[in-house]
């Protein structure tokens, strides 16, 4: 894949007519199948910038984000009550992406302005929608959410992780961990100059379970009683089998 | 070898799960405890979502208990009549427990209350068993190694209760109320704490009902199978949290371990068995208490949001 990349990039760059400063991009894979031995996946995101006029002043930057399905999350803080550590204050984050990765060509502060970040929700704190209700410092809670998810590789900030060649060709690779949630993973590519967003490109990566994983998941949700009985049957059969095997060994 | 669990939606090492299953299975076979009070916290530690861990563990306990109870049936150390009385109480208790669990979840403190339950129950039971076993061992040593004949039990309040029934295998003639209540209580705990409840039932049978130690293990396993089976079905149909792949891996290790454990159990003396179980119960209790008392390195924790 990596060896093919420059050729692909060159093809992409040549094949297209020149218009404004826009993005032409591709993904190494558009669907990720979760199989029984799924260990995570790496996706390659690459593309080119096409322009009809010479590049204007200022450094051209590229930001690439991959965002998993959003879910509500409860963030709780422990406090010491009567000598025991107890969940005390908590906030409800309305929608936090189950996975979020941002790769940039330069440090975050240099590639996008505050206003644009707010508008497009690019940086990790902006990607989380939280309404702090009745808590003194809601930032402490959202920061904790980010810290915990970063430690699990679910949130990744990869500054200077995007390679940009001749202000035209760019590529990056983003590693998706094994504990992925099913759904559409929105991939966005931002082209910025002087902190202003010039163009946005969006594409979804479909992450889904296949094969046995799909079968078990569907059975559990669509025929829960049968699934439950089947689970018990397997358990009892395994218990009996082990007992029989050991009796045979002893005899 | 990593394996992706379809319901838990996490990827874990298959050999780790087999090993955990095996280790807990050995203990389960030795002591007649389902092992849930060890396995459920262990599953939390390796990153299985708590709801899935509790439900799947119930399923796994069915397997290891079934494997264990067959061995006990062979040696005729199951008091079926007593088991059925315990079971009736257990099913009612489990149904109550599921309601209580739902209520606690609503209050948002279910985690703390479950932990406190563990610390209190394990602490009391472990402590009682430990000192009682020590005394028993000292007594048998004092009488020159010979096992002292069981003393005639004194009449207690339990003997005054109505609805008496003869339990031949246990050699008891007692009211059905205490065993039914023990079963009920264990059923509640099974649903709330995600365990089989053997660690409560075994001591209750020995010290409260006065059952002979040799039938206690088999009879408790018999009751646990049905109560945890019932819990598995409840979890599967209401919460969709039973993970078949996780259960299979745990139970393959578990059933093998349980067989080995049952064999080890028959070689040890009852007092030694009890003191070992007591030490294990106290160790788990100590670890849980320590976690509650010491400042955690991460004060914040994430939970499933309810959504607005």
Image (spheres, coloured by chain):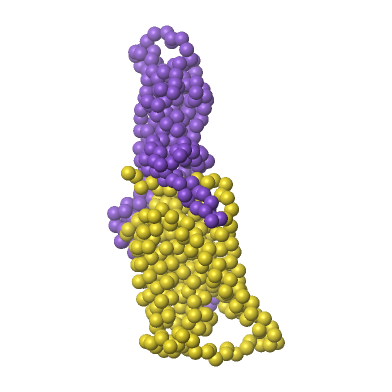
On the image, the x and y values in percent for residue A148 come to 50, 42
Q: Quadrant of residue B85?
A: bottom left
Q: Quadrant of the C terminus of chain B?
A: top left
* Chain that appears yellow: B
The picture places residue A15, in percent across and down from the top left corner, at: 37, 17
Q: Nearer the viewer, residue A250 or B156?
A: B156
* Residue occupying the point 69% across, 83% down: B141
Which x, y percent locates residue A56? Answer: 43, 9
> In the rendered image of this protein, does residue B26 appear above or below residue A62?
below
Front one among A153 and A18: A153
- Which residue shows up at 70% across the image and 85% down it? B142
Asked whether residue B229 appears in the rendered view, the answer is no
For this orientation, the residue located farthest to the bottom is B152
Residue at position x 41%, y 55% from top? B51
Answer above or below: position of B83 versus B294: below
Percent x, y for residue B261?
A: 55, 71
Query: Could one spot residue B43 in this view of the protein?
Result: yes
- Residue furthest to the left in view is A222
Q: Colour of chain A?
A: purple
Q: Nearer the viewer, residue B144 or A117?
A: A117
User: Eyeballing the image, is B262 above or below A145?
Assistant: below
Mark count: 0
Residue at image location 39% in from the left, 36% down from the top: A129
- The reply, left or right, for residue B144 in relation to residue B170 is right
Seen from the viewer's position, the closer of residues A191 and B278 is B278
């Amino acid at each position: 894949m990596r060896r093919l990349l420059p050729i692909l990039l060159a093809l992409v760059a040549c094949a297209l007519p020149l218009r404004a400063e826009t993005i032409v991009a591709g993904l190494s894979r558009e669907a990720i199948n979760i199989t029984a031995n799924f260990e995570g996946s790496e996706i390659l995101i690459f593309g080119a910038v096409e322009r009809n006029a010479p590049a204007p002043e200022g450094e051209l930057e590229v930001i690439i984000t991959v965002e998993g399905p959003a879910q509500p999350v409860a963030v709780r803080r422990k406090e010491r009550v009567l000598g025991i550590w107890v969940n005390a204050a908590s906030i409800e984050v309305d929608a936090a992406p189950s996975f979020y990765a941002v790769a940039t060509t330069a440090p975050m502060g240099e590639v996008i302005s505050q206003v644009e970040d707010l508008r497009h929700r690019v940086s990790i704190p902006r990607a989380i929608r939280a309404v702090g209700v009745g808590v003194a410092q809601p930032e402490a809670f959202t920061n904790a959410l980010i810290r915990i998810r970063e430690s699990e590789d679910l949130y990744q900030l990869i500054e200077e992780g995007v390679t940009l060649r001749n202000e035209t060709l760019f590529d990056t690779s983003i590693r998706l961990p094994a504990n992925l949630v099913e759904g559409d993973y929105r991939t966005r590519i931002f082209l910025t100059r002087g902190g202003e967003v010039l163009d946005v490109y969006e594409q979804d990566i479909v992450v889904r379970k296949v094969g046995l994983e799909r079968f078990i998941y569907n059975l559990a949700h669509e025929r829960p009683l049968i699934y439950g009985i089947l689970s018990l049957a397997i358990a009892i059969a395994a218990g009996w089998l082990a007992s029989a095997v050991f009796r045979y060994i002893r005899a | 070898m990593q394996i992706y669990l379809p319901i838990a939606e996490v990827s874990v090492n298959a050999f780790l799960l087999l090993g955990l299953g095996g280790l807990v299975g050995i203990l389960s076979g030795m002591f007649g405890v389902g092992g849930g009070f060890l396995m459920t916290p262990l599953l939390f530690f390796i990153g299985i979502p708590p709801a899935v861990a509790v439900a799947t563990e119930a399923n796994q306990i069915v397997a290891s208990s079934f494997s264990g109870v067959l061995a006990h049936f062979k040696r005729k150390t199951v008091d079926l009549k007593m088991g059925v009385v315990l079971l009736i109480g257990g099913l009612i208790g489990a149904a109550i427990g599921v309601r209580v669990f739902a209520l606690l979840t609503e209050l948002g403190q279910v985690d703390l209350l479950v932990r406190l339950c563990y610390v209190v129950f394990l602490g009391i039971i472990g402590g009682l068993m430990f000192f009682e076993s020590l005394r028993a061992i000292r007594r048998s040593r004092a009488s020159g190694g010979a096992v002292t004949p069981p003393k005639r039990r004194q009449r207690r309040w339990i003997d005054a209760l109505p609805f008496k029934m003869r339990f031949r295998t246990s050699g008891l003639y007692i009211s059905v109320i205490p065993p039914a209540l023990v079963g009920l209580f264990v059923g509640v705990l099974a649903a709330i704490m995600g365990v089989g409840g053997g660690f409560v039932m075994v001591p209750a049978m020995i010290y409260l009902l006065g059952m002979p130690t040799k039938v206690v293990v088999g009879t408790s396993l018999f009751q646990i199978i049905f109560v945890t089976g019932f819990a598995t079905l409840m979890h599967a149909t209401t919460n969709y949290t039973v993970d078949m792949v996780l259960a299979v891996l745990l139970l393959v290790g578990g059933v093998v371990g349980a067989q080995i454990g049952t064999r080890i159990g028959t070689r040890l003396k009852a007092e030694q068995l009890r003191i070992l179980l007591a030490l294990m119960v106290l160790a788990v209790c100590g670890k849980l208490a320590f976690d509650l008392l010491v400042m955690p390195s991460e004060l914040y924790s994430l939970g499933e949001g309810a959504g607005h």
